[in-house]
Image: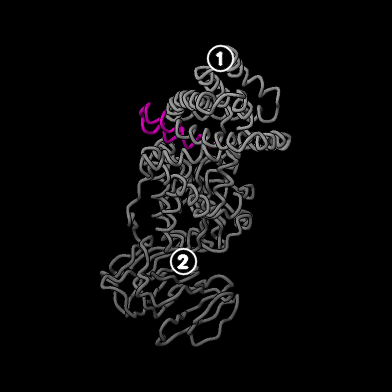
Amino acid sequence: MTAGSFLAVCFLAGVLTIASPCILPIVPFVFARPGQSVLRGTLPLLAGLVAAFASVVALAAAGAAWAAQAHDIGRAVGLAVLAIVAATLLSDRLAGLAARPFTDLGGRLSGRAGTGIAASLVTGVAVGLLWAPCAGPVLALVLTGGAASGSPLATGLAAGAYAAGAATSLAVVVSVGRRLAAALRASSAVAHRLRQVAGVAALAAVLAIASGFDATVLAQLPAPASSGIENALLQRLPAKAREVAMPASSQVFRSSLPVLGDLPSFAGAADWLNGPPLTAEALRGKVVLVQFWTYSCINCIRTLPFVRAWAQSYAAEGLVVIGVHTPEFAFEHDENNVRRALARFGLTYPVAIDNGFKVWRAFGNESWPGFALVDAQGRIRYRTAGEGQESRTEQAIRDLLTEAGAAREPVATPAAPPAPGEQAAADWDHLRSDETYLGYAQATRFASRETVAADRPQVYSFADLPANRWGLSGTWTIASDRAIAAAADGRVAYRFNARDLHLVLGAGQSGHPIRFQVTVDGHAPGPDHGSDIDAEGFGTVTETRLYQLVRQADGPRARTVEIRFLNPGVEAYAFTFG
């Protein structure tokens, strides 16, 4: 918008002021000098009005520019002034008190004016002083645009254009005659009620802004609805005016993420690791990432490098990461097992122990892993399930931190944070095998010659395995959630097609270490060994967790892996692949 078009907008705004009740106090002055010509009476009066009004607005613009730089102080002052204005709209007595200095000055000037051009001019100055305090919110555009230029002349011109527009409306009123003026006076009762309604609305706005309720409501609007209107208005200001209207240090970013509900309570957690219990109330003002996981879940494990990086990288900007450990298998209820997992994965953020699934249900979570992202006002703004959404999740974190007014621009974490062993992302493009449970409650693809004998020892055997089938050899007891080797030399084999093969294993009730050896297509794995065995295929079960047995160095292809347990008592839960 050019300077000329901006002045035209100001002039038009002034013309439209005739529709405002605030113009009514001026009308009697316009008709106060009967018998005088337009040149000696009306025009000098209106010229004085324009000059006085422009001067008052120029001073106000200077104050507005200072307040814009004062940030919080300016905001507090602005709220106080708005509250006073709202009170004057509600009460005629308060309005009279607030306007008394101006009306007294205007009255003295008018009383001494006498007759003639000079007298009309002085009366116009008095009217301008009377009108300036109640010209209305439409002046915001004039004040902002004028103050933005940094030039007293530009500010005066903008205010003068607005006042000239109002004067033009008044001149039309004069030309139409006293009948129109009488009609305007007759509407004073309606105008009084409208002023009171506006006062109530203004006080409500003060309370909403001071409490932050306005931000709560606006954040729930779709971004195009709120920011689109904002941008449309701002684009009609000159570039420098936009800077004053919304300076960089006080611009409010509102994410387009929807509001999905309030942050539930963590009261259902049985215990907390890595810190004291946290509450929804204590987390207000922080952006919170809630991660539902369980420590032997491969999908959870592969997200840990990202969660660990976010917790470290964004802590300074106000991010709090909370892990909610909700177990899938019975051994995952043991807090000591969880503590060992936290140490192994290097997790230092707070972890809630959710053995009873109470926090899981409070959040309505449905998967391992599951994520919920909460804004600084305690509202869930983003959910995702499973792995593979790390880029979207990080962007959502950055958006909510920016929305919360992060002290500095959140910096991106590395695209591929360190991910040793089983934490590395899967080779999804070539993954041809699916998670497979060994307990009869969820077992599939079992290919031993014998039928499963539930909860009792039985000798099993297998021959050549078809693709994605598994089998047992030796004496095993198949329970609902696992298979238990009842004697030494028990074997389990799987024909798989993936880069990585993992098996969740435990040492059983004895707790003694259990040695095992892995072969791939009948040979030692060599460079294809996983992080929990050596090149000869040897490893040891020391705790109940996921063990990485195979990582094919030359990429995925169909292979048969066989694990032979050299000691009895091992418990095998599930195969997973990557």
Q: Position of residue 468 (x, y in %)?
A: 43, 81
Q: Quadrant of residue 314?
A: top left
- Residue 495 shows in the view: yes
- Is 266 above or below relative to 434? above
What residue sits 36% from the left and 62% below the top? 424
The coloring applied to the image is one colour
The reply to whether callout 1 and callout 2 are in contact (CB within 8 Å) is no
Q: Main secondary structure of the magenta part?
A: helix
On the rendered structure, is 90 left or right of 63? right
Q: Quadrant of residue 330?
A: bottom right
- Is 478 above or below relative to 310? below
Query: Looking at numbered disc 1 in the image, what kind of residue is underneath it?
Result: Ala
Q: Position of residue 370 (x, y in %)?
A: 52, 59
Give the quadrant of the N terminus. Answer: top left
What residue sits 38% from the left and 39% below the top? 408
- Residue named by callout 2: 504
Magenta residues, start to end: 138-159
- Residue 196 shows in the view: no
Q: Nearer the viewer, residue 156 or 460?
A: 156
Whole-angstrom CA distance, mark 1 to mark 2, is: 98 Å
In the image, which disc is placed on residue 247?
none
Query: Looking at numbered disc 2 in the image, what kind of residue is underneath it?
Result: Val
- Residue named by callout 1: 113
Residue 153 on the magenta segment: yes
- Nearer to us: label 1 or label 2: 1
Secondary structure at badge 1 equals: loop
Q: Nearer the viewer, residue 18 or 137?
A: 18
What residue sits 34% from the left and 58% below the top? 420
Q: Position of residue 292 (x, y in %)?
A: 53, 56
- Is 556 above or below relative to 169? below
- Is 420 above or below relative to 80? below
Residue 130 on the magenta segment: no
